[in-house]
Amino acid sequence: MQYTVRIEQLPAQPLAVVRRRATQQQLASVVPAACGKVWNVLRSQQVAGAGRHVALYWDCQDGQINLEVGVEVPQPFFGPNFRKPIRLIGPGEVIGSATPAGPVATTTHFGPYQQLAAAHEAIRQWCAVHGHTLAGPSWEVYGHWTDECNRDPAKIRTDVFYLLEPK
């Protein structure tokens, strides 16, 4: 697949997330399970305006990726859309977070999630060629699933973002 990489200036997007640590090989099971956990909480709280699933990759230590997985929310997590603050106890606690604000390199991937590595590599290569320095975090925003995605995996949309150092 050919990728068109572009630079955008983005505001922070509020999220409801769970924090996880996983190896690269575990992501295919960890990310969907975490998304489901967050959706269940948002559904139980009757949160209006929840958006797409997001996986935010902060860093990697000792072969483990530190990530936050969840859902876009229309305002910071403890906003007035919630009937009461959500404070789940124990591992997998759903908390408020946000995507980083600032300049990003981004591209759109169409196809199965197992092929997302190519989109990440396209952004990293493009940045190296064009003199942009990655600032650390990256994230994936998964398009809404439709019946068409079940019939044709090439319709699955994922937007990939890398925060950049300001020039």
Image: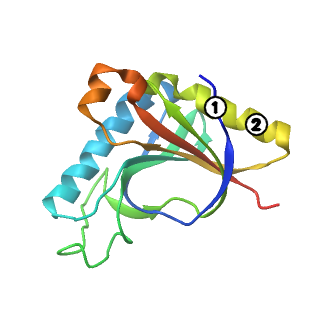
SS for dot 1: loop
Question: From this viewpoint, is residue 33 visible?
Answer: yes
SS for dot 2: helix
Identity, as a three-letter code, of the amino acid under mark 1: Tyr
Residue at image coords 35%, 67%: 74
Asked if 149 appears above or below 51 in the picture, the reply is above
Residue situated in front as seen by the camera: 96 or 154? 154
At which x and y percent is residue 120?
A: 62, 34
Identity, as a three-letter code, of the amino acid under mark 2: Trp
Asked if 8 appears above or below 141 in the picture, the reply is below
Q: Look at mark 2 in the image and give the residue it sits on.
A: 126
Q: Look at mark 1 in the image and give the residue it sits on.
A: 3
Residue at image coords 46%, 41%: 21
Residue at image coords 51%, 42%: 159
Asked whether disc 2 touches disc 1, contact meaning CB atoms under 8 Å apart, the reply is yes
At which x and y percent is residue 88?
A: 24, 61
